Amino acid sequence: MSPAALRMREELVALLPRLRRFGRAVTRHREDADDLVQMALERALRRAEQWQPGTRLDSWMFRIMQNAWIDEMRSRARRSEIFAAEEEGEHVGVSSAEAQIDAIAVRRAIAQLGDDQRVVVGLVLVEGLPYKEAAEMLDIPIGTLTSRLARAREALQAILSGATEVQP
Amino acid sequence: MIDDETLMAYADGELDAPTRDAVQRAIADDPQLAERVRRHQALRGRVSAAFEPVLREPVPPSLIDALGDAGTTPGDSKLVDLAAQRAAKTAERPRQGPRRWSWPEWGAMAACLMVGVVAGPFALSALDAGPFETSAGQLVARGGLERALSKQPAGAAVKDGKVAIQLSFVSAGGEYCRSFALHEENALAGLACRTAGQWRVQVLVRDDSVAAAGYRQAGSASPAAVLRAIDERMRGQPLDAQAEQAAIARGWRRP
């Protein structure tokens, strides 16, 4: 293995927890999230030469995951699969009961957003990417990113403050 | 008139200096604007907190397998796992026959801070005395470590040679976090974040470089696992001395 490929693999190992977290935000499901990470890892290794050492590997991977997820959604739509709902109270190791309840509420609210808004929330609010990085990753102007993010936040506030219906 | 997108960008620290200053002035005159900024920040904190625990989950072996032989992180410190220790206490582990962990798996465990391995004379149970205690399944600092985290400026001369504080910052979730190194019976390095009036230990690593040298200097580097934990959490820049003093004076409550 070339030193660059080896280095990429090492960095990917370190990134795995964040890739899983981003996958969870994007897909809404634990199993889907891990399948998506796996798919993205395989794609990344196949085109390892396209990654330039010194550039952000996280953004590069998020982009591969996002594209893989779009492909997956399309093929599911063709197969007319129905999405199972996220299980209530899925266990994620939060330390206090109160925090656990809030975390569930927040994750469920994000799951109600449309795909475009959810990925923006995942990149900026969950993964902490700067607007510029997130916009570049999605190939959209920064203004589009900002307005998507603002609408997503508005929708989340509405869901979390108890409003039942939201315009995604 | 400031629109909501600008306020949001302000809350996210995304504005250039002149716009940021203008928003700051407007906020000072308008409690309603300040409240909207606060709502943006609070939501960001909640979203970040809702997914943060995923980082502490063990990574499924299938994902590590997908990476082949790359998982080793040579030269990394031996890690002491908190989450795995909790898990081992509360859950029985289904075992399908004897199985050896491969190096890639260890590497990935280190990466997700599933710091599990205890090598040598060091045992985790010993942590329940001394500088740590467990509270609701969470390791928190106490005693001299708690005092140093609360009162000692980063980089200052190491007080009584026991605790060095290296770096203070605000996490993406809006908590104050500080990295520390301890030199008692074992040399340990870690990261603690301030939540609900406690310094909760996020990662704790046995620091063999210190064991080898026999001492630690205030400015010496943190182990890779601690740096990764910092890197993953930190929002913006580390606190400067002034911001740190102000935080100490406020008892580490966010302004």
Image (cartoon, grey):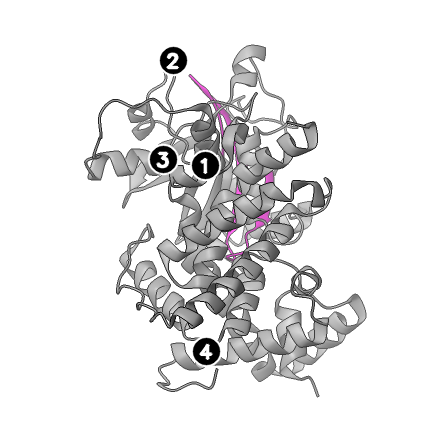
The numbered mark 3 sits on a residue in which chain? B
Q: Are marks 3 and 1 in contact (CB under 8 Å)?
A: no
The numbered mark 4 sits on a residue in which chain? A
Left or right of residue B142, residue B9 in this image: right
Secondary structure beneath dot 2 equals loop
Q: Are marks 2 and 1 in contact (CB under 8 Å)?
A: no
Are labels 2 and 1 on one chain?
Answer: yes
Who comes first in sequence, dot 3 or dot 2? 3
Alpha-carbon span between mark 3 and mark 2: 17 Å
Residue appearing at x 44%, y 41% in the figure: B63
Label 2: which residue? B120
Alpha-carbon span between mark 1 and mark 4: 37 Å
Alpha-carbon span between mark 2 and mark 4: 50 Å
Label 4: which residue? A157
Secondary structure beneath dot 3 equals loop
The answer to whether B182 is drawn above or below residue B154 in the figure is above
* Crowding near the residue tagged with mark 3, few <14, some 14–19, many ≥20 C-alpha atoms within 10 Å: many
Q: Which residues are magenta?
A: B167-190
Residue appearing at x 28%, y 54% in the figure: A91
Label 1: which residue? B64
Residue appearing at x 60%, y 76% in the figure: A148
